Image (cartoon, helix red, strand yellow):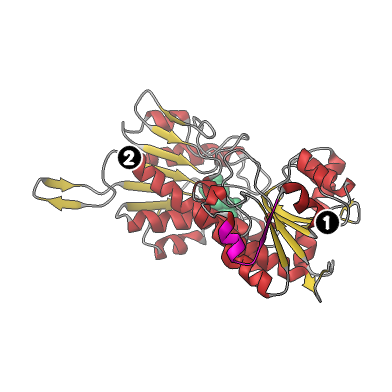
Amino acid sequence: MKVAIVKESAPNERRVALVPEVVGKLTGGGHEVLVQSGAGDGASIPDASFTAAGAKVVAEDALYAEADVVLRVQKPTPEEVGKLRSGQVVIGLLQPLIDPQNAQALAKAGVTAVSLDTLPRTLSRAQSMDALSSQANVGGYKAVIMAADAFGRYFPLLTTAAGTAKPANVLILGVGVAGLQAIATAKRLGAVVKAYDVRSETREQAQSLGAQFVTLESVADATGEGGYARELTDEEKEAQQAELSKYISSMDVVITTAQVPGRRPPLLVTADTVRAMKAGSVIVDMAASALGGNVELSVPDDTIVTENGVTIIAPTNLPATMPGGASGFYARNISALLTHFIKEGEMTFDFEDEITEGTVITHDGKVVHEPTAKLLSEGGAA
Ligand code: NAD
């Protein structure tokens, strides 16, 4: 089978779908790997490294003409959908629940679209394919590094001949995959770390990494389906913001990672709360997006400094800022999902299988992924 990787076209996207090590495994398994020239540039992987791993470097037109399966990080643009042909398979983080129209266009083109972001994450046999977790892990790490860089003082306690520097007080809001990595990273840098989440099972996880867990009196456990949080009621949201405000105002660094699937990210840090923070404090809003983030004042993909001297950083694609590390993990996830579908050298889709049912979005000219089809019939996006 011919498996191809494209050069990503989304702005600031520096990741690449496969790295040479994983290319070597695929070619070793008898597959041919085509690489669009320059695909690895953003991740500092030259064409020559792909060639050395057994891939063939080709121009874009040849890639789309020859490939059986196209691997990518982000969803194809409408122009790229036009380049795919009927019967081809495309695999990536296609976001069908955010952009169901893109899925519809892929169905119309007769393309089989497979999306890593709709993988059933609680299946243990799907762990190695879980790109949302691997990329959130990268993001949680990088958020702390960015905060430490923007913070004008030390993270660790330092005792020197010139005096003692107090450790930074860091609060992590949202203890999912990104939050746990943020706790671990901030602890490694020597900060005093507190953490909070609405799912009570996260208490032990945060504590096991050395964080103090913050318990709010006003909000009870809000565990929802599939290990995720449910959306809070309006009363709960208001009470949560007010109670959190007391903790946040004494922090040096706050990193927010809270998400609720299919909903806007919850607002955890209001403008009033930021006004109560000390000059020099830093907030990183990992949930920032065009839909809004966890921090009222955050501006997606920008860094602002408020009148009272608080820096608010709102990166929308942190994994792309660590393209080598993020691509390495992503490549293993996507190749695990790809090889799951290969039976006797061909892509085979068994819709009785939960992984297939969860990830195959379009097939045989139709949108077959039920949640995406439902969204399209309702005429909207999540
Ligand atoms: P996510 O990105 O959807 O959310 C991040 C965190 O924000 C979650 O921990 C959530 O509880 C929290 N949150 C949501 N609303 C909040 C609020 N109002 N206040 C405070 N915190 C809030 O989640 P994720 O990191 O992708 O995954 C979350 C969980 O899903 C994991 O911790 C795990 O339990 C489960 N999961 C399981 C597997 C598996 O079983 N293999 C794999 C991945 C994830």
Q: Nearer the viewer, mark 2 or mark 1?
A: 1
User: Circle 2 is placed at which residue position?
Assistant: 151
- Per the model, the C-alpha gap separating discs 2 and 1 is 48 Å
Q: Quadrant of the C terminus?
A: top right
Which of 251 and 4 lies nearest the eye of the viewer?
A: 4
Q: Is residue 24 above or below residue 193?
A: below
Mark carried by residue 88: 1
Where residue 314 appears, as percent x and y from the top left, is 50, 37
Q: Label 1's element?
A: loop
Tell me the residue at 8%/49% (across/down): 161
Looking at the figure, which quarter contains the N terminus?
A: bottom right
Residue 51 on the magenta span: yes
Residue 317 shows in this picture: yes
Q: Earlier in the sequence, mark 2 or mark 1?
A: 1
Front residue of this view, candidates 100 and 277: 100
Q: Is mark 1 within 8 Å of ligand 1?
A: no
* Residue 29 image point, x, y percent: 69, 75
Q: Which residue type does callout 1 highlight?
A: Gln
194 lies left or right of 226: left
Residue at (49%, 50%) from the top-left corner? 322
Callout 1: few (<14), some (14-19), or many (20+) C-alpha neighbours within 10 Å? some
Q: Does residue 376 belong to the magenta stretch?
A: no
Q: Which residues are magenta?
A: 48-58
- Residue displayed at 75% across by 59% down: 359
Q: Residue furthest left?
A: 161
Residue at the far right in the pictured view: 365
Which class describes the residues within 10 Å of circle 2: few (<14), some (14-19), or many (20+)?
some
| Circle 2: residue type | Phe
Q: Can you see residue 114?
A: no
